[in-house]
Image: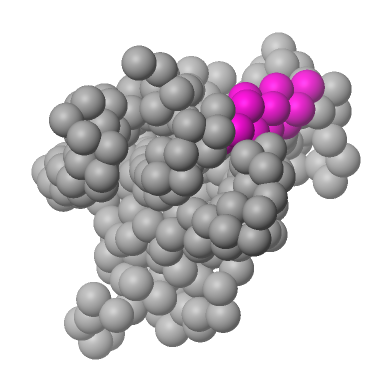
């Protein structure tokens, strides 16, 4: 087998984590490793698109609420709702309080149960509420939040794909990416994202630097707590769990960015 190039990893990241028209040319563990290490890069692009939509509406004279709704909707559109669907399915599986095999079966069903509906509603309300507050303060704060939260969301996927985290099923996206990222590489990616967020936060001044860096750290912590709970309950990770981790991290980052 030919050696995996960085382009293969980038294609894997964008082809599996976004709805952008990027063809995945290789579907193996080496490509998955590169792809999951590049996951925050896909998040950066998604976040920039979300900030651009919010900024365009603001420039056209819309209020902060419409800009907030559009900014929250853009990542959903650019992933075809994949992460939101994963969040809902994970909530249904965890909320069922059933053994791992039964919970995983519930998560594979196409319908959404009450736990999933309630979780989706609260998460989206929280995201829109924060973005409304930030856009009401200034477009810069809203844009920074869109980019930082989307990038932190995909960093959570890199960390969840680290070595030692098992898959819950022998098939699916979870099995394809579980354990592919070396722990050292995952930490390096996390450090790079924290530094990048801090640099972006500088647009808001000294307090923005610290706030953005802390937002990424809190997002990673929230995702890690959810990850450990899912591993205990399901025996490992699934594609749905990855989606749930991304939304949990994005929401946690937004909440931190709204404080102070």
Which residue is more in the foreground, 260 or 176? 260
Q: Position of residue 69 (x, y in %)?
A: 68, 43
Name the chief secondary structure element in magenta: helix
Identify the image quadrant of the N terminus. bottom left
Give the residues drawn in magenta, as a range. 118-132
The structure residue drawn at horizontal position 22% and vertical position 26%, both measured from the top left corner, is: 207
Q: Quadrant of residue 9?
A: bottom left
The structure residue drawn at horizontal position 52% and vertical position 25%, both measured from the top left corner, is: 230
Residue 106 sits above or below residue 75 on the image: above
Q: Position of residue 211 (x, y in %)?
A: 28, 26
Reply yes or no: does residue 128 show up in magenta: yes
Residue 175 sits above or below residue 68 on the image: below
Which residue is more in the foreground, 1 or 228? 228
For this view, does 70 lie left or right of residue 25? right
Reply yes or no: does residue 130 show up in magenta: yes
For this view, does 185 lie left or right of residue 56? left
For this view, does 125 lie left or right of residue 19? right
Count of marks overlaid on the render:
0
Q: Position of residue 158 (x, y in %)?
A: 33, 47
């Amino acid at each position: 087998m030919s050696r995996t190039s960085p382009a293969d990893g980038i294609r894997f990241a964008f082809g599996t984590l976004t709805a952008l028209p990027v063809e995945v040319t290789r579907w193996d563990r080496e490509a998955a490793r590169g792809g999951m290490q590049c996951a925050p890069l896909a998040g950066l692009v998604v976040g920039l698109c979300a900030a651009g939509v919010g900024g365009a509406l603001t420039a056209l004279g819309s209020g902060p609420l419409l800009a907030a709704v559009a900014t929250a909707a853009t990542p959903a559109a650019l992933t075809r709702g994949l992460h939101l669907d994963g969040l809902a399915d994970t909530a249904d599986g965890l909320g069922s309080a059933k053994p791992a095999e039964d919970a995983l079966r519930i998560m594979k069903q196409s319908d959404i149960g009450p736990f999933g509906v309630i979780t989706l509603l609260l998460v989206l309300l929280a995201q829109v509420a924060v973005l409304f507050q930030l856009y009401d303060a200034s477009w810069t704060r809203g844009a920074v939040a869109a980019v930082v939260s989307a990038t932190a969301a995909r960093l959570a996927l890199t960390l969840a794909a680290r070595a030692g985290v098992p898959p819950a099923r022998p098939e699916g996206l979870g099995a394809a990416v579980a354990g592919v990222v070396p722990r050292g590489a995952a930490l390096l990616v996390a450090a790079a994202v924290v530094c990048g967020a801090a640099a972006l936060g500088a647009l808001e001044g000294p307090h923005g630097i610290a706030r953005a860096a802390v937002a990424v750290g809190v997002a990673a912590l929230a995702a890690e707590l959810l990850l450990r709970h899912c591993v205990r309950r399901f025996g490992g990770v699934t594609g749905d769990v990855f989606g749930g981790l991304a939304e949990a991290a994005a929401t946690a980052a937004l909440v931190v960015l709204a404080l102070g």
